[in-house]
Image (spheres, rainbow, N blue to C red):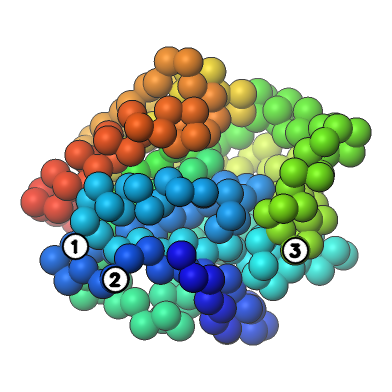
Amino acid sequence: MPIEFITVPWAGHRHRIEYAWIGPPQPARPTLVFLHEGLGSIAIWRDFPRQLCEALGCRGLVFSRWGYGRSTPRPHDEAWPIDYLQRQAVEFLPAFFEALGLDARATPPWFYGHSDGGSIALIHAARFPHRVGAIAVAAPHIFVEDVTVEGIRATVQAYREGGLKARLVRLHDDVESAFGGWSGAWLDPAFRHWNIEALLPHIRCPVLAIQGEGDEYATMAQIDGIAARVPQARLLKLPACGHTPHRDQPEAVRDAIAAFLSAAASTPQTPA
């Protein structure tokens, strides 16, 4: 998976974004875009994207969002806004696709988003219903729960006092950029009011929402809330699974997503 870089004009700046294609173009299949979690980057995915793309016979796209991996870091004195997930979904993704020459109008891509990436996928599908073929989301957030805030506080302690920072250094050129942006936004008292439930009924594409029963950052209320507002959504609740289903149960998640997206390729979208 050769790593490449591209400059994306966005929000008044030119951001250098780390990305990689998985496999050659497959004209008969949509591109599958992978959206990483709040502390992730290209490196965190390991071999899962390749395995899933091979199972589907499609091309994949992985990248590190601004502030992560080897992409342009966040200035340390710049806080992420409360709506940073919306801005990534509505502003950055279209700019990134345009820079790559990926025409989402002609061939709507598929998405697999994890955690923050799942929220971004949901927002993007709601705002651009005819530019998304289908989405699978794992441990997505649609509102803020007490368990989420408590989990992030514990992660901050592990970063400051445990070995988490040393592990994250392998994923990011500027680990303070990634960790400070994510934790600072989620622990801002104003972020407790963040909520995307009102956007969900605008999603027209097939949706698979996955969550582990042992998720340390959320309860099943997250994906149950998706099902309540997106009639075509399917849920997969995994026992003995935490916040990262594709790591905790990779084969089950790969097979479920592959079957779901293959079926979605022949399923017409819900009329607007």
Disc 3 designates what residue? 173
Q: Amino acid at mark 1?
A: Arg
Mark 2 in CB contact with mark 1 (< 8 angstroms)? no
How packed is label 3: few (under 14 Cα within 10 Å), some, or many (20 or more)?
Answer: some
Using the image as rendered, state which of residue 29 and residue 107 is in the foreground.
Answer: 29
Disc 1 designates what residue? 29
| Residue located at (40% from left, 51% from top) | 49
| Residue located at (69% from left, 64% from top) | 67
Residue 85 appears in view: no
When asked about the image quadrant of residue 111, the answer is bottom left
**Could you tell which of marks 3 and 2 lies nearer the N-terminus?**
2
How packed is label 2: few (under 14 Cα within 10 Å), some, or many (20 or more)?
Answer: few
**Could you tell which of marks 2 and 1 lies nearer the N-terminus?**
2
| Left or right position of 65 against 272 | right
Using the image as rendered, state which of residue 32 and residue 82 is in the foreground.
Answer: 32
Residue 187: where, in percent of width, then height? 76, 40
When asked about the image quadrant of residue 76, the answer is bottom right
When asked about the image quadrant of residue 150, the answer is top right
Instruction: Give the CA distance from mark 1 to mark 3.
Output: 34 Å
Disc 2 designates what residue? 24
Q: Nearer the viewer's eye, disc 2 or disc 1? A: 2
Which type of secondary structure does the marked residue at label 3 adopt? loop
Instruction: Give the CA distance from mark 2 to mark 1.
Output: 11 Å
Residue 259: where, in percent of width, then height? 20, 39
Q: Amino acid at mark 2?
A: Pro
Is residue 112 positioned above or below 157 on the image? below
| Left or right position of 97 against 74 | left
